[in-house]
Structure formats: structure tokens, C-alpha cells
Image (tube, helix red, strand yellow):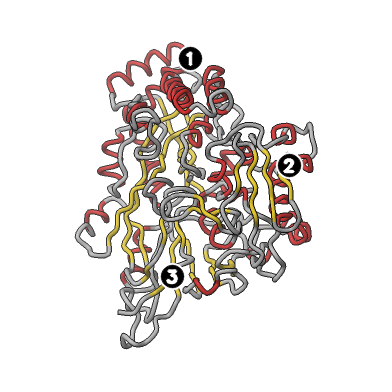
Amino acid sequence: MRKTKVLVGLLSTAVLLAACGNEGDAAAPSGSAAEAAEQVVRYTAPTELATLDTALMTDINSANYGGHIIEGLLRIDADGKPVPAIAAEEGTISEDGLTYTYRLREDAQWSNGTPVTAHDFVFAMQKLVNPDTGAAYSYLTETIVNAPEIMAGEKEPSELGVTANGDYEITFQLSQPTPYFEYLLAFSPFFPQNQEFVEEQGDRYGTSSDTVLANGPFTLENWDGTGLTWDLVKNENYYAADEVQLDEVNVQVIKETSTALNLFESGQVDNAHLTGQLVKQYADNEHLVVQPKARTAYVEFNWDNEYLQNDKLREALGLVINTEDLVNTILGDGSTEIGGFLPEDFVSSPVDGTDFAEEAGDFLEYDVERAQQLWDEAKAELGVGAITLSLVGDDDEKNKTISQYIQGQIQNNLPGVTVELRNVPKKNRLALADADEFDLLQTGWGADFADASNFMDLMYSESPYNEGGYANEEFDALIESAKSTNANNEEARWENLQDAHDILEEDYAFIPLYQEAESQLRNPAVKGILFRSVGNEFDLSRASVESE
């Protein structure tokens, strides 16, 4: 998910751990070994929730918590594969790959006691493709029959190729084979919504804990829509409630590393995110865990800015960012350099198993001398001696530090370029991005499903996540070929996507920064947290707190 939005070996940006006992003891609950541990986790999150409306979720933090309260037909298991959730069993897929049919379990309920039915999925899917909804992830439905026409306003949502066969069977009719379709069914935009409740809430749906229904292992409570705290509470109506051990997960947003560290050391929270020198300081601490992610961070250009339309300027801006220094000195959290758009160890060639990122290669390397030469040429072409660019990013400590580093690298190495920083809460940053109110956007992406297209689609000219407005007809044609003509030809599809990546390199379409990793101090008392390689990053639904 976006921008925040994961794969092979990935871990949550909010992973927390354990919980228990006296506030002064974060390592284990007090009392004898025979005493039962309190099944409460005290979790820290890096950012606020943006929405609980699954049709409108675009950030990974909202999806992570939304995924604890709402389940889809399928979920992603520990091996990164889609398996039945609300579906009672594996689906039936036609030989031509165009028809998917699932039988729903009949013991699934919403938190108000009403049954979860196929009609809830049909309603949610029709809402997703309805252009009035304005769902950024609606493009993922494009291979479902009539979805493109509905999104274009040419057909009605009721004509979507998703039908309920009674209350407990649903069929998806596709217009072309989609190799990753079952991954989509485990992704939050494809989750069900209770029509009666949603229509009763109207525009308020998903804007607070009181305006959303749960059908998953937890309900979400005590969130007013803007607050920095909320609670996950065990959902007694969940079909597998007897498998859920935690009674509560108390969540608070902590953006300052030093604050989280102090709270962790005093036993008031069960994890603390570390960056920079603190990672080195705690390198030998037994509670330190470093988790790599298949998530890339990058700077996106606003192509409406007349200066940034100059390819020499774009290249120069990329060449002065010392990513080796960024990951090793500034971040120091295990994040690694990356030369392109996709993370390493994410997807590999169907021919010889070569990693996509390795085959794509690097296209921007630190070279101040070359950058200054290009800047001089750009100034002559643009007819200016100096320019000012805004850089928009999140306001947590890590992202503010990265913003300041980027600002310094550009201003110190390209005299005449001024970078004005605007660090805001993530919810506001997403709004600024959607409104094109930036010149440079500090952002990132973690894949929602295990396919290279999940990254490459972001730069398609009509993608809702192409906030900067990048457009290249040849790039678009290759993406379209990978989705249609070569959808069932793995080798040709791979070549399409590699060729498209080459075009991004030639256009200096963005500035790659790093592949994320996360370093945390964690209380070891919580066991059984599932960290996924695809989709939502972590799952506490089968976790528990153990006594010493």
C-alpha cells in the first residue's frame, strides 16, 4: 500500500510486542509462573489512522489495523499465500482463468450480530468501482467484467461482473486472466461491507470507531477519527474467537524516537522504533530486532512544475543524494540502498530466477560533479539562475530527518536551488499529494500483492497513485501489454515490465532512496505474531502474552 505501502520478509511499521503485568516491567508480567499473563498488548504506531473505510484506505497503517477488524474472502498466511478466511474453502477457478467461485462460511457475523453474506461482498465491490466513491484502488478491479466501463461512467455499478448466488456463494467474472487475482481477494479494498450499516452512516462511515462494523478477530474502539490512540478489542462474534488469545491491544501513536524509547525502558509500552545512532547504541541489546521489508522509499516529481520538466534538473537532483550515507549514517536502521523502483528479493524471472531489481540495475549514483554540470546546463535551458522547490513529507521523526538530509544535499551541492520543507501528518501528506500541492514528494510503496505490476502500475499515466503526473506513451503501452496481450505469457510479460523500468530510468522519473528495514526494541513476552510478506504487514489475531 501506498506510501507507505511490504513483502518478502516484511514487518510492520507498527509492530509491537508484548504486554503485560506491572508498568515498571516490560519484559514479563509479574507473579508466579502459574499466574496467567494479562492478555493485553501495549502497541505503538508510527502514524495516525486515515480511515477505516476499506474502499478508501490507501496507507499501510490504516490497512494494518483495518485488517485486524475486517476479513475478506481470503487472507495471506505465514507462507505468503492466499488461503480461505470468510470463504469456507478454496475457490473454484475455471480452466480459462476467467471465472472464480467461492462458497462462504455460514458462521461469520458482523459485530452487530448480522451474518456476513455474499451480498456484502457484492455491495463493497460495486462501491469500489463506483466513480462517485473516488476510490484510489478501484483500478485493481480493471480485469473484472465491466469494471473499466463503470469507472468511466459508461455503465452502472450493478453491471459489475461480481454476483451473489444466494447468500453464501459468490462469483467473479474476469475479462482476461489475472495471475494475482486471489491476492487481490485478500487485500483490503476487496473486503466486504454491510450495506444497511454503511448507508445508515452515510459520509461518516469509517471516520471513527463508532461508524464501522467488524467481522474479524477484533473490533476497533476509542478512536474519534483524529486521535492518536485507539484499542483493538477481542470480537466475541468472530467465527474463530476461541483462537484469539489477546483481550486488547492498546495503541498509541508515538512519532519521537526518544519518547518511545523512554516509554519502553520504563515498561509503559512494549516496543520502540529506533533509527540512526540509537540503533548502534542498542546493537547488542537482546530485545533489538531488525526486520527487512520489501518496501521502497523514493522522491516523486510534480511534472506540472516547469522546472522539473527539464530532464537535466531531475537527474542532477538525484545525483546529489548520497544514498549510502543516508542508509548507513542518517537512518542506520538496517535499510539498504536501492537503485530502482522495486525492492530486492520480491519477484524473480520465470526464465532463470533472476531477481527483478538485480536485472533492472541501478540508474542513479552519487556524483556531485556531474550533477553540478547538469544543473548549469539546466539553468541555461530554463533561463534562470535560481529556483525554489517544495518538499512534502510526513512529520514523524524519521521522515523529518530524511527531509532535512535531502534538503541539505540539494542546497549544498546545487547552489541556486532552495528546498522548502513541509512535513505534515501522514493524513495531510496524502491529501497534499492527491491535490498536487508539492514539487517534490517524499513517499514510498510496499507491495499489496506479489507481482512486479504492483509497483510498475504506479507510474502509469492514469494511475491514481501517479500523483506527480508522469506520462510516457511507450511506458503505458508496455504496462498495457503486460496486463492484456501477454497476461498469460510469463516470459513476455516479464520483458514488458523490465522494458518499462528501463524507460523510467531513461526519463529520470523519480529519485530512489532506499529499501526499508525496521529496527525495534521489543518485549519478547508476546508470542505468535505473524509477519506477512504480502499485503497487511502483521497479524496479532493468534498472538498471546506468556508469563516467565
Q: Is residue 446 visible?
A: yes
Q: What's the mark number on residue 382?
A: 1
Distance in Å between CA atoms under marks 1 and 2: 42 Å
Image coordinates of residue 372 in percent, x first then y, are 32, 20
Q: Residue at x 66, y 69 (%)?
A: 111
Q: On the picture, is 334 further left or further right than 46?
A: left
Q: Nearer the viewer, residue 495 or 315?
A: 495
Q: Residue furthest front?
A: 95
Q: What's the mark number on residue 130?
A: 2
* In the depicted structure, whether residue 421 falls above or below residue 271: above
Which quarter of the image is occupied by the C terminus? bottom left
- Could you say whether the residue bearing mark 1 is in a helix, strand or loop? helix
Q: What's the mark number on residue 42?
A: 3
Among the 4 quarters of the image, the one containing residue 340: top left
Q: What's the mark number on residue 349?
A: none
Image coordinates of residue 411 in percent, x first then y, are 36, 31
Amino acid identity at mark 2 = Asn
